[in-house]
Image (spheres, rainbow, N blue to C red):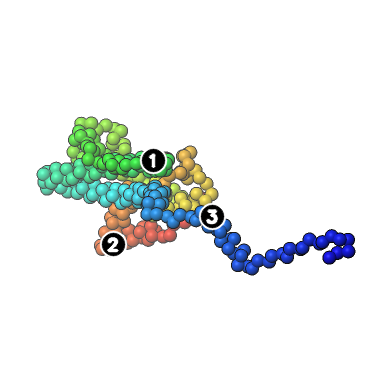
Amino acid sequence: MARDGKRKAPVKAESHGSPDDGDDASGEDDEDVEQPRAPTIEDWKRQIEVEVQQAIPGALRMCVSNAKKQKHDLMKHTIEGVTAARNLAPLAKEHSMPLVDRLKQLTKEYALINGHIGAFDSKLTDLERTLQAGPGPQSFNGLLDMSAFHVADDVLSKHEYIKQFDAAAGIEREDEDDEDVMVQESNSVRSMSCPITQMLMTEPMRNLDCGHTYSRVGIESHLKHKQSCPVAGCRKRVGNLERDVDMEVLIANRSKATALPRHGGATAVDTDDDDDDQEEHVVE
């Protein structure tokens, strides 16, 4: 008992809990936190659908691009067939007119194929623009359908292929005029020399903006310095280039024609061919 007559209040000892007590408390708090829900099959399906929809436009653009590239190979085979029929026309006329008629019918079929390729390429271009503008159409049914494609016979008879065949076979045409003759003559003497390298073209590329054709190595070197067309007097820019399959066929036919005299030992042609085989050099 204290001297002042007051009793001291008992001091309550502090309680030091064990570490296990704190873990129990935190464990109770963890139980209150909502655990993330495991994805279900439907969640995975939706995620896959989103990824597929995002990938489809790019895949379709690649398919369209590949299809448009194949157009040039198809056009090249068509032009080769037309050229072969036209070259045979004078010889066929000397022996059999029915053979000339069959060659002309074959040329008409090539002209029809040419139109079919052009119409299909137009549909591909429209689809390409649609894919570039947005996610693409919901349905592709009928977008590339060519079943309705048709060319009337009177329209087909005025095709450039038919006009060239008739001219080669010596067949007179009622609709032929001086302008048609000039066009045919300009096509027959079309220059196969690159305006940049001044050599026989290799891998000819045509400028869609102005129609001029250059060798690939020449135009690629030219574009490193200038964007304008290298042909004198042309003010167009070199923007869209594509394979010039017409020029490819012209060059191939020339190579075949100049190679034939070699079997006879002609030296003049040999010398000319050696010049054509030289490596192209850019002349600016």
Element under disc 3: helix
Q: Evaluate whether residue 164 shows in this view.
A: no
- Give the Cα separation between the discs numbered 1 and 2: 53 Å
Determine whether, in the image, residue 42 is placed left or right of residue 225. left
x, y percentage for residue 4?
88, 61
- Give the Cα separation between the discs numbered 2 and 3: 94 Å
Mark nearest the camera among 1 and 3 is 3
Residue highlighted by disc 2: 262
- Give the Cα separation between the discs numbered 1 and 3: 52 Å
8 up-or-down from 208: above or below: below
x, y percentage for residue 69?
35, 50
Q: Quadrant of residue 107?
A: top left
174 up-or-down from 165: above or below: above
Element under disc 1: helix
Q: Residue at 27% across / 48% down in the picture?
A: 79
Upstream in sequence: badge 1 or badge 3? 3
Residue highlighted by disc 1: 130
Relative depth, front residue between 172 and 99: 99
x, y percentage for residue 271?
36, 60
Q: Residue at 22% across / 37% down in the picture?
A: 148
Looking at the image, do the residues carrying marks 1 and 2 touch, with CB atoms under 8 Å apart?
A: no
191 up-or-down from 155: above or below: below
Q: Quadrant of residue 146?
A: top left
Q: Residue at 14% across / 45% down in the picture?
A: 102
